[in-house]
Amino acid sequence: MDLFQLEMKVNGEAVSVPVNPGLRLLDVLRDVLHLSGTKEGCGEGECGACSVIIDGELVDSCLVLAPQAHNREIITIEGISADGELDTLQSAFLEAGAVQCGYCTPGMILAAKVLLSKNPKPGRQDIARGIAGNLCRCTGYAKIIKAVELAAAGLQQKEGEAGV
Amino acid sequence: MKKHGYGIGSMWYGIGSTAATNPSGAFVDFLDDGTAIVLSGCAEIGQGSTTVLAQIAAETLGVDLEDVAVITADTGVTPDAGPSSASRQTYISGNAVRLAAEKAREQVVAKAAELLDLDPVDIRLRHGQVWYEAEPTGRTIKDIIAQCRGEGILTLGHGSFNPVTTNLDPATGQGTPYATYAFATQIAEVDVDTETGIVEVKKIVAAHDVGTAVNPQNVEGQIEGGCSMGIGYALLEEVAVKDGKIQNPGLSSYLIPTALDMPEIFPVIVEATEPSGPYGAKGVGEPALVPTAAAIANAVADALGIRLYDLPLTPERVVAEIKALDSLKPE
Amino acid sequence: MSETSIVGKTVLRVDGPAKVRGESRYGADIDIPGALFLKVLRSEVPHGLVKRIDAAEALKIPGVVRVFTHADVPGENSYGIIVKDQPALTDKVRFRGDALALVAAETDVAAKRALEVIKVEIEELPPLYDVWAAMDEKAPEIHAKGNILTVSRVKKGDVDAALETAAVVVSRRYTTQRVEHCYIETEAGVAYMDDDTLVIKAGTQNPHYDRRDVSRVLGLPINRVRIVQSATGGGFGGKLDISVQCFLGLAALKLGRPVRIVYDRRESIIATGKRHPFFVEYTSAATKEGKLLAVKAKIVGDTGAYASYGPATLNRAAVHATGPYEVLNVDIKALCVYTNNPFSGAMRGFGTPQMAFVAESQMDLLAQALQLSPLEIRRRNVLRPGSLTATGQRLDKSVGIGATLEAAWEKACQVMPGLGGEAR
């Protein structure tokens, strides 16, 4: 089988790798680029554990074939903490107790990130809708929703301070 | 039409394996710089046990939480802590860690008492400092451990704990299956749509007696997660099996609650402290789920005046029961 | 209790930072260069004797290194936390999902292709899907000791006499369904030899048990097996059983190469334990003042093809069958029954969520019959310090059921305005 020269930006860095065109983006991230923060939970786009951000949108990377990611900009969980410092959402997940087994956490944080990029002041129902494609079996979602509220408030405050 | 109902579910749950030995062991190594390593076979599966064990070790050793590292669940390194099941790890492995930490601590206390010419019973270790009753002595744990090392003394501790139980009589089941029990009451509020049969859980109040809540936020997290799993059990989930074959082996056909299925949950922590537990703790992992479906089923019965005897309470079943009752009613 | 400064305080999870960064390594995340991929061939047949497994075609596929069957298991080919009744690779099929063969290959694709061409000859036996049929004396035996695995009893007082004097008696039948744990992380892990020690890293709830049964199945001394729990993405009881451990161990030991395995969701659901479906006949009786007089119950649990934690589940169900109430006269019988269904094991609560549904429904039925509120009938019956449980255990300390009842009611009155306070 001919290999496909996949070019994309992952977490801000240009990537160019020859891959089997039948590979899923999930496999490219995990097996080729060794970014194992992106998880597989169901392989059919139901659980959201494999969520990544592609050009600003939340996408299940198990449903994306490698060529579909060509020339796109991908952000994974490894890409959201600038210079090793935790992202506001990551800190909020810790503070709110939104992490238990942690397996859904990367996808959940990215879902929340996309939500807040589109709606900086979400209500509880907006948050529930924003993370409804990401399954969590441990938390009952209560503290995840709380974490997103905390992060939204934190971001608002940061923005306010920056504006002064 | 939407009908509204409330239901109570209460439960008890024996902590640890039923009428069986289920010990746990732990090692604690109090190190040269006043930090400590805890070794426990306890498997962290998301329930928060590693954090709880770190808290118990730090509390017992008199150091800050950041100064405790817990190494878990490696049979090449850690002693057997038994399974992470039966809501047993806080109570049983928590006790093993407490005992191990007490042994390590005793050596530091004994040396401090000797150096300061004080009675060991008056020595307290807090935040890495050595105290004489309510007064700091100016000596640190690190100083004392250095003194121990200079004399060739390692500040190690090991502990093991097995809850006090008996066998059950095979004919009558009489005996003491558990050393202690957790308790809970949950109250559910539901709306039932009589046309579609869809049950919507609006709110759940969940009051849990966990003994001392070692980490209250973590206890709440267990309760909220348990309620979510209980909602799935009551209303949504069933592995469909036909002729021994699972018909829904995927997450597109086996549905669990999403964020949109969750009501507001009000956890209430009740602390009936258990004298044999580490700092009075019992457990919460399973109790969180146990009464949820019961409370929801009772709420549905309250709403409809009809009781369903088979789980899950699917829309099809609810509608069928409403229709069956209607067909009995005179015109 | 003396003042504490760390216990009793909310502190941040010690494993939290690695988890929010996506840096925790779960079983499928552990990357060992050169590791072989393992896949399991599972039975489509529910019950039968394996006559022949022919892997000749599979071994011709480039990249396929080895196909293992029951004949390759070096130690005792049986594991189980309570009853050693489950083979690692079987020569008798007991459910649609039993492991027949294990493929090791250089690539995932080659391993999958191998599964498609392994030929298995099975002499089928009549299947039993129904617990009642399985309990019939003439039913074919799924395991050598018969289909009723265990019978748990809890008896005290004189139930029949109590039923005669009771003001109200309520008898009902209940059923509960089979449920999947559905942890978001499926079963996965790696194994390799470290000199003469077999190292297995996998998600688990009980590494020391894993070590015992891996050493048993592989015929190794316990100290030559090292189980390291990888970060585990939920368990809820489903990762208490052996899943991938023996496969990993067998292949790494026999091939001397690192190996890895990951169950996809389908395999995770098909091959691992479930919550027991229960069939319950339950009678409870009370005085006209609403004091529980008697509880009589027969509980049958479908443990499917293997015991797993079934005996513990039914035993716990029996012990907890009354609910958190004082009852003087108790007669509970709980049977754990084999069928050719997928096996049932431990799941959060071990039979008590099933029994809570039953016992709490009964409490409301009694309340209704006596024109008491659900709150009031519970108030009159909850265990208190000094109470005797159904097993005759005297509870003295830390008996918080009454406190949870009052606390829940108080909170509910605040947050559920329609509840109507004490008037209900």
Image: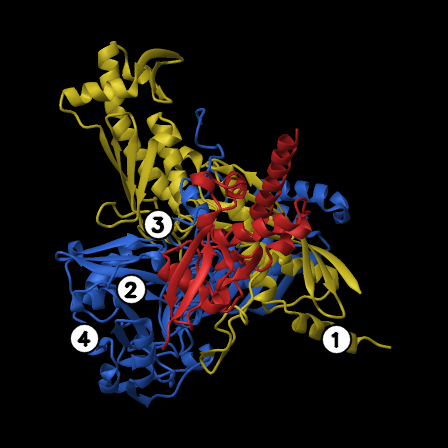
Front: mark 3 or 1: 3
The answer to whether mark 1 and mark 4 are in CB contact below 8 A is: no
The dot on residue C260 is 2
Q: Residue B23: image x %, image y %?
A: 30, 47
Q: What's the CA distance linking mark 2 and mark 4?
A: 19 Å
Q: Which is closer to the viewer, label 1 or label 4?
A: 4
Residue type at mark 3 is Ala
Chain at tag 1: B
The local secondary structure at tag 1 comes to: helix
Name the spot of residue C114 as percent of width and height, x first. Answer: 30, 80
Q: Chain A is drawn in which colour?
A: red
| Res C240 seen here | no
Q: The yellow chain is which one?
A: B
Dot label at residue B43? 3
Which residue is the extreme one toward the top?
B117
| Dot 2: element | strand
The amino acid pointed to by label 2 is Arg
Mark 3 to mark 4 CA distance (whole Å) = 31 Å
The residue beneath circle 1 is B323
Amino acid at dot 1: Lys
Q: From the viewer's perspective, is the residue at label 2 or at label 1 nearer?
A: 2
- Residue A76 place in picture, x, y as percent: 47, 53
Q: Residue B264 carries which label?
A: none
Q: Quadrant of the N terminus of chain B?
A: bottom right
**Of residues C284 and A37, the one drawn nearer to the viewer in this rendering:** A37
Q: How far is the residue under mark 2 from the one under mark 1? A: 54 Å
Q: Mark 4 points at which residue?
A: C72
Q: Indicate the amino acid at tag 4.
A: Asp
